[in-house]
Image: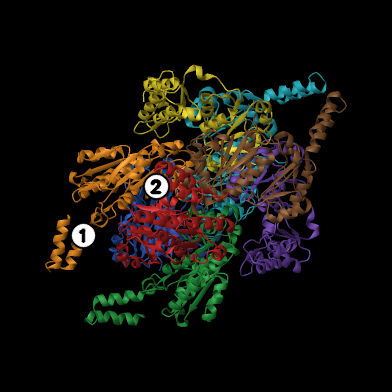
Chain colours: A purple, B cyan, C green, D blue, E red, F orange, G yellow, H brown
Amino acid sequence: MNPDQIKKLLLGVKTGKTSVKEALSALKGFSQEDLGFAVLDHHRHLRQGFPEVIFCQGKNDRQILALFRHSLNRHPKILATRVRPETFEAIRREFPDARYNELGKTVAAVKPREETREKGLVLIITAGTSDISVAEEARETALILGSRVETLYDVGVAGIHRILDKKKALERARVLIVIAGMDGVLPSVIGGFSDRPLIAVPTSQGYGTAFNGIAPLLTMLNSCASGIGVMNIDNGFGAAVLAHRINTLK
Amino acid sequence: MNPDQIKKLLLGVKTGKTSVKEALSALKGFSQEDLGFAVLDHHRHLRQGFPEVIFCQGKNDRQILALFRHSLNRHPKILATRVRPETFEAIRREFPDARYNELGKTVAAVKPREETREKGLVLIITAGTSDISVAEEARETALILGSRVETLYDVGVAGIHRILDKKKALERARVLIVIAGMDGVLPSVIGGFSDRPLIAVPTSQGYGTAFNGIAPLLTMLNSCASGIGVMNIDNGFGAAVLAHRINTLK
Amino acid sequence: MNPDQIKKLLLGVKTGKTSVKEALSALKGFSQEDLGFAVLDHHRHLRQGFPEVIFCQGKNDRQILALFRHSLNRHPKILATRVRPETFEAIRREFPDARYNELGKTVAAVKPREETREKGLVLIITAGTSDISVAEEARETALILGSRVETLYDVGVAGIHRILDKKKALERARVLIVIAGMDGVLPSVIGGFSDRPLIAVPTSQGYGTAFNGIAPLLTMLNSCASGIGVMNIDNGFGAAVLAHRINTLK
Amino acid sequence: MNPDQIKKLLLGVKTGKTSVKEALSALKGFSQEDLGFAVLDHHRHLRQGFPEVIFCQGKNDRQILALFRHSLNRHPKILATRVRPETFEAIRREFPDARYNELGKTVAAVKPREETREKGLVLIITAGTSDISVAEEARETALILGSRVETLYDVGVAGIHRILDKKKALERARVLIVIAGMDGVLPSVIGGFSDRPLIAVPTSQGYGTAFNGIAPLLTMLNSCASGIGVMNIDNGFGAAVLAHRINTLK
Amino acid sequence: MNPDQIKKLLLGVKTGKTSVKEALSALKGFSQEDLGFAVLDHHRHLRQGFPEVIFCQGKNDRQILALFRHSLNRHPKILATRVRPETFEAIRREFPDARYNELGKTVAAVKPREETREKGLVLIITAGTSDISVAEEARETALILGSRVETLYDVGVAGIHRILDKKKALERARVLIVIAGMDGVLPSVIGGFSDRPLIAVPTSQGYGTAFNGIAPLLTMLNSCASGIGVMNIDNGFGAAVLAHRINTLK
Amino acid sequence: MNPDQIKKLLLGVKTGKTSVKEALSALKGFSQEDLGFAVLDHHRHLRQGFPEVIFCQGKNDRQILALFRHSLNRHPKILATRVRPETFEAIRREFPDARYNELGKTVAAVKPREETREKGLVLIITAGTSDISVAEEARETALILGSRVETLYDVGVAGIHRILDKKKALERARVLIVIAGMDGVLPSVIGGFSDRPLIAVPTSQGYGTAFNGIAPLLTMLNSCASGIGVMNIDNGFGAAVLAHRINTLK
Amino acid sequence: MNPDQIKKLLLGVKTGKTSVKEALSALKGFSQEDLGFAVLDHHRHLRQGFPEVIFCQGKNDRQILALFRHSLNRHPKILATRVRPETFEAIRREFPDARYNELGKTVAAVKPREETREKGLVLIITAGTSDISVAEEARETALILGSRVETLYDVGVAGIHRILDKKKALERARVLIVIAGMDGVLPSVIGGFSDRPLIAVPTSQGYGTAFNGIAPLLTMLNSCASGIGVMNIDNGFGAAVLAHRINTLK
Amino acid sequence: MNPDQIKKLLLGVKTGKTSVKEALSALKGFSQEDLGFAVLDHHRHLRQGFPEVIFCQGKNDRQILALFRHSLNRHPKILATRVRPETFEAIRREFPDARYNELGKTVAAVKPREETREKGLVLIITAGTSDISVAEEARETALILGSRVETLYDVGVAGIHRILDKKKALERARVLIVIAGMDGVLPSVIGGFSDRPLIAVPTSQGYGTAFNGIAPLLTMLNSCASGIGVMNIDNGFGAAVLAHRINTLK
């Protein structure tokens, strides 16, 4: 059901051709589709600006493919995250246009004309090379949502002069996503001289007392630089959703 | 040093009246003032849009008063957080205009003409009555930064119909701050039907396995509603700073 | 030893034909059978309404098969949980009627006439698709114990209107089992408008700060909706046992 | 608004005297009353069988008294939990009939004719003397909800024969609440020979590695006795709510 | 120092040429043999009653074999714990008399005449079938140290009558080793009616909040039954060493 | 009821003067006395060699005094632990012979002729001065149980030569109780050269990452010196009970 | 051994009557003095370069004063840490020259001519004002040990330019002690551009997820800047000891 | 760019041949080289005495090889840590001189004349055989940095006399690195009689409550021996960097 169909339905309500109850039930019946193991929520595109995103961790290939089929029939764009390479093979056989981001483990299937970008820029920064996979999940998500994205990778604090050199890039951005594992120090440093909304994502990189991301998570939650919003460990997707919402505020 | 003074200084540089070195040192000497136990950073007002906020926890009254004196001489507005009632008594004796928020434990000393508000609305929501002290810290902070603020208190999930009734208030807001202790469920529920940037603050309210805020913190970090930025436990101040930055994006 | 045999024995005691000591020893000797590595407790069927349930995690196939053989000789019904697919292959070779639930990882071997159901309904609800394996363990357990079961899968909080649509189903049930991973919010939401006994099961689904189920466990223990009984992480079996006990209260 | 008033309103709807919209708004407007710091939910009595219970931890006396006044005007019974002795003094001055349970820290204000009891028995058992305060919170809650209650205190496992002597009491009960701190072993032992629905409550009693209730909480969640529903640490109130719901199932 | 040197030294003692004190000091210096990656402590047999026990976890096969060779040359008995099956294959090729306990993962190489047993009995009890591997590590250790051992497996608390039936076995023992995973309740129950020294070993059996043995560890440390000595998770070896020391006290 | 009374009763059973049922009920009725808030277990003296020990933490003075009265009527000796100074004042007013150990916070009321000591020696060792309070709880407990006790205080590892000087004292002992906070290293060091049964008690002394005793607890559970039995944090009482049981083994 | 005996011994050495070896061994035996509750180790001054430092936490005033008296008789300098103000009052009454550092909570009693300083500089840096108490404990310790000390307080990362301004001070130092609470970011930043040995001390400052110092501790242990040695939370004393050892390396 | 080239550049600046801006840009452009996924920092060799060390965990072979190529072109020496054996195979194919340390998992590529050693000695000590892999990472790092290194492996505390025998080796060293898993006791023991700067490294060796290195980490942070600097779990590399910095202090 596209926006035109919805408008038509609502006009029917206004003119009395359709009762409120009928309209309601039509909208609702449409907006949720029961696949047995999952309930697709097609209306979220209207409600929240994006379609059913398929989080593939904990689902088997059969379930993922079924979700792909039902979603693609109705939405102009779709995104799958945490996609195992084997799963992508299965997807590609059926949807040859699907595009896989190996580092970010995302699959995107987007129809071209949706690709117009917001004017605002989401800047994604990582402290190290190993944080890039989370950054790529964020990048793919922000892109499919419609934001412009730039990236600055491996500008970690060990050489703080590296970041200071990048001040101009920071000023160009409307929202920052800063991703770091191990000591998670980078958001504090960047937050110390930038006044942009800053979203911090801890990663599970590191060893020993990094505790799979707890150390950088705590660093970020306790940041002396005020006003940093923190995401779950490795949650590049969520960071991009929040960044896009901020980026598209009118 | 006000913007005019700074402009003058920079013109002096341009015209050669002031050497770059002199100007730099003037700006630097001014922007940081060493009190022995603390370094005031007067330039943050320019850099980040707000003055030295005095976080009073862990400082004694003598230190806090000294910081008040030095800050008020230079800034049009000032905010102190985590202020003990006894400390406020000491402040009031010297600064009779200072205003204390008993629940939020903040002290604000603002010169009137700064009170012009941003058009965007920051809506602060709490799940329970006991979360209000964190909400009030956020409210005072957002107000002094210059945002418009409304509040919805005690609309917790135990009666979910309460929130559903408030949908219109949610739609009026530009940014949401959702504050909850115990199970920390409220941000997930609100995030389920709102597409506003949502900042979640866990509180230390509750007992037993609430673990002084760890339980709601984890709930918020793992929220099934995508794109929620999470703050440290009880960090109403930080939530307001982030909300204000988002609210004032052009 | 069936109820008739037991009655006969007790009559013997009453009439003096059998000494108390003999009877006791007969009952006891019977009720526990030592397999070397495990003591079967055949009397639990009488004492608690169900036979030795075989928890297969941590046992090897040889041990599991031995337990199957001894149990099936004496009980009308038997259930094995946490059964690896390979183990089921070994079981099926010897017990071709055994039925495997792939998602729930249970094996049931039930003699038909035991299948009469309680009138009360146990309703099993999951927040997401990945929680279904726990739900299926619960469903198989409740069924073999003799309860009627219905399921509602993937009605998570991200779209809270989904649950509100299901109110009627909730009212039809006598007991609710609500299963959720990640933020574990669903039991709080359902508990907010239902007055049924509600059993909450956290699952190990999610990543990062979900901490393999600790996050939803804490959410459930701290639920603002009063009166929710919480089970161990992924413990669908235990939830069903408690639900069945409640369901069969006279 | 009492049931008669509600019936009258609904009849008005049926006969057309009152529009559905008016009725709805009347019911809703009534059911929630905004006190500024708290939203009273008067309809929960209808929805869930009990009135606004006032959880006093984290609220000041002024707030608690305001909640008392508003609630007592409309409900036949009211319960406050976690009441500090000083707070009770303030309550008693205004409501001389209020009854304080010193150990359980509850205040009950019940109008007499509501005191008819359910036939089923809720049996509350504690392992030690120091667990009694939690037990008394549970007892007061179950009583005000309308259940019959008996108690067995200090029957801990150190002398397991103590419990075995109490088997008859266990059989008389319809639901069991078993409360224990330190090693939290008692629910496992009782669950080993009883088939009643069993609700386990860990307490913060003990020292060192009892970790304020984490040790008994884990014991209960991992109990080898199947089908035990676990509550938050010290949550006697929640245990009673669940027990009462089970007890009053038809 | 080679055997010839030792002989020479001892002869010196016999003939009075060397004082006992000199010889002792010479021997102590000798008692450590440097293998580059490990220092064998051959004198511990004298000092503490048992030889270098080879803890194989974290060592590679080459290292383990080297330790076997050096130890067997000098000690009447030797024990290796945490031995992977592949490692045992390597050991057996060189030491065909070595005996592998598959469940306990121990390898024992004992010269026959050392097998005289202490009079006292060490009784090893497990709660479940899956705890047996820890029990077997303990059994093999106690046997090679020279204690008499009996075992009672799978007498868990779910059916507490099982244990009560075993009272006589408990009374026959001089020391008890009680091994349990999940809720770890068994030592508390046995400690409630036995006055023997009781050593409790938590196991990593269970799932979810068993946290790989933390739950039973806490239960045991907090046991209401006084005087229980607790070992590290899965540490059957250590339990046997302590039990043997107690068992052989004169 | 003293042993003579019990013998008399049993003779009555043998000669038929007393039925088994009467005797049983007499013994049972006697052995447990219900004080409302606590069940005294007078038979434990026979069963486990010591009377009801009153653990005062979590009990109020009224309860403690009631337990004292009932216990002293029947037992030759009694011990209270974790006694607040104020509580002792209340005890002394009624029982002027009660003896308070200020450091250990124990109260002992012993009739003189019970003071005969076991031949074996329990040696109690502390690492630091601040661990002495736990050591004194252990000492008082071991003394009242009837063991001989010696102490070595403040022989911590910071100067390891201190311990090496004490080797002779260690050899004289039959059982060792080693108490340490902070790094908890002492039991490992002593266990390295002594073959006595060694009971380790972590204390809550220290700061920061000592985590109120978790650090030394973990050190002790992981000790490289085999065969150390570990107690709960600060549990001097339990250590003495275990030490006494070992000490009195025949 | 009193001073006279020591003199006599040393004279014996001078005159050749006593060999150095004999004297040394005699002195060692003497070097420990048993106060009942503590063993003074007077020789550590020789062994490790500093006297018995009195850690006052967990000791009562009587014990602390006794330690003062015994130490001052023999050592040219003495330091007490974690001294409560009341305790200092008691100390001053007896030792009027003792000097109290209120922020650092140390008491120093030093004889003047010991005050010669090492040439190397220990630079102590704090992130915030509230970390100063730990810094002062470190400063007093380093001073009494004989190092030169400078301090840089409140140069936290929120304004990173502050630190960059201090590069010269960093280069002048031989060892750095960097102290920070909350996010603990400062050592990472300084370690990023300095090659001095850097000792990091987390403090218990902060709130919520700072977890009393766990957050900065983890940040420091995981620092991307290599080669940072980390101390226990709030352990200014230990940091100074290590700094002094490094500073005095020849 | 070698030191000569840099000197030349700076002279150019002095003589006016090169503008400051040009020089700056030359230095900066050189010092950081952007590989897309990583920013090489070639100036660290000057700033901190060592080149880009390649931490291979979390990087793929392609990335590691690219880093090798770029680094080797400019630096006289290079070190890679946490190198998987497969990765080394790929490295060796291209750089046949690269040397792999199998236990330490490091790859070193050093040009010969850099091998001159510092006079000071870094002594690396391990408690057990399984800690050697961490020790070898430290040894390779210290060697490539230019320090002299000796090792003492498997001198754990279980036989404390082993360490006491090594006192002379300890005195010869300028800095100590002490590595231990399980109880982590060794640094405390060595720190008790040595006054050298001591760096402690916990390892993830052990099982159960060793919690992958948390137990020895806590032991070391809480060490009663003052002045021990602690590293992250298994961080042999960082320990060597700190040791080398201390060792090369003038």
Name which residue type carries label 1. Gly
Instruction: Identify the element where label 2 is drawn.
Output: helix
Residue A188 versus residue A235 in the image, above or below: above
Q: Looking at the figure, which quarter contains the C terminus of chain H?
A: top right
Dot 2, how many residues are within 10 Å of its Cα: few (below 14), some (14-19), or many (20+)? few
Q: Nearer the viewer, residue B187 or A155?
A: A155
**Discs 1 and 2 lie in a common subunit:** no
Q: CA distance from mark 1 to mark 2?
A: 70 Å
Q: Is residue F123 left or right of residue B238?
A: left
Tell me where residue B59 appears, x and y as whole percent: 52, 30
**Residue sitting farthest toward the top:** G113
**Residue sitting farthest toward the right:** H17
Kindly identify which residue carries mark 2: E14
Instruction: Identify the element where label 1 is drawn.
Output: helix
Q: Say which chain tag 1 marks.
A: F
Kindly identify which residue carries mark 1: F29
Q: Nearer the viewer, residue A195 or D193?
A: D193
Is residue D233 something one can see in this rendering? no
Is residue A8 something one can see in this rendering? yes
Name which residue type carries label 2. Lys
Residue A102 versus residue H194 in the image, above or below: below
